[in-house]
Image (cartoon, helix red, strand yellow):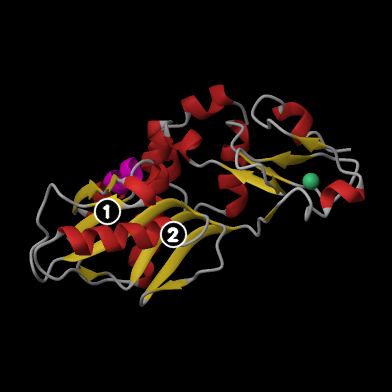
Amino acid sequence: MTKDHLRQIHCTSLTAEKEITPDKLQEMLEAVEAFWIYSGNPADCHAGMTSGKHTNGFIDVLRLLCYSDISLGLAFALANKIRSEYDGPIDWVIGSDHAGAALAQNVACWLGAKSDFTEKGPDKSQFWKRFQIEEGEVVLQVEELMSTSLTFGKVREGIRAGNPTPVTFAPVAGVLVHRSNVWDFDGTKILAFSHYDIESWTPTECPLCPAGSKLIAEPKKHWLELTTRH
Ligand SMILES: [Zn+2]
């Protein structure tokens, strides 16, 4: 699949599919150079992160979500997945600033709910300050990618802190790509299309360097070399 092919995908072709399989999602992410997993072969490269750590995987779902038809189609599938597990009320769909925002709005369209996003503050905090969630209304959280539960938790914390009355969260939440070990957060079950175990290490702890795998320090600039398998 190529980027040109992605641009030709209309959301109706995705909404016609029964479900988005992990392979299908991975194929689309690879087309926009947003997905790489170390092959396990030391002849292949591994990647450095901006933090200085080394890693065996890289996923950036936002690069796919800027293709608006695909975002809408993925949101449809996520809404269906949520409805297959939870048929109770959903009044708001809320995601994080930045990448969760558009997805939250698209999911809300398919669920007939209201939507907005929390806004980034200092120290990874997320603020809720523009709307009041009425008492009794139910909030569904969605995120495009869950790496740890940090952002997910900050969104929830921000909504609670910014709303004048107590907030009820749905017993499920929707995630496109899950790479965390958290499947239950504060009583909310995390539903995801795909899961990957990705690790990162300090340079001295990295097991891939001593195994002979070459480090690619700037993966986005050397994407072809990183993703070439021997
Ligand atoms: Zn390394």
Q: Secondary structure at mark 1?
A: strand
Q: Residue at x 19, y 54 (%)?
A: 113
Place of residue 187 in the rendered image (x, y in percent of width and height, measured from the top left): 36, 77
Quarter in which the C terminus is drawn: top right
Point out the residue furthest to the top here: 4
Place of residue 49 in the rendered image (x, y in percent of width and height, measured from the top left): 64, 40
- Predominant SS of the magenta segment: helix
Taking depth in this image into account, of 120 and 15 the one nearest to the observer is 120
Q: Is residue 56 left or right of residue 156?
A: right
Taking depth in this image into account, of 82 and 38 the one nearest to the observer is 38
Q: Is residue 10 left or right of residue 108?
A: right
Q: Residue 27 falls in which quadrant of the image?
A: top right
**Residue pointed to by mark 1:** 94
For label 2, being within 8 Å of ligand 1 is answered no
Place of residue 10 in the rendered image (x, y in percent of width and height, measured from the top left): 41, 32
- Segment tinted magenta in the rendering: 101-106
Quarter in which the N terminus is drawn: top right
State the separation of the CA atoms marked 1 and 2: 16 Å
Q: Secondary structure at mark 2?
A: helix
Taking depth in this image into account, of 186 and 201 the one nearest to the observer is 201
Q: Is residue 2 left or right of residue 217?
A: left
Q: Residue 212 falls in which quadrant of the image?
A: top right
Place of residue 112 in the rendered image (x, y in percent of width and height, measured from the top left): 19, 53
For label 1, being within 8 Å of ligand 1 is answered no
* Label 1: how many Cα within 10 Å (few below 14, some 14–19, many 20+): many
Amino acid at the residue labelled 1: Ile
* Label 2: how many Cα within 10 Å (few below 14, some 14–19, many 20+): few
**Residue pointed to by mark 2:** 150
Q: Residue at x 34, y 49 (%)?
A: 96
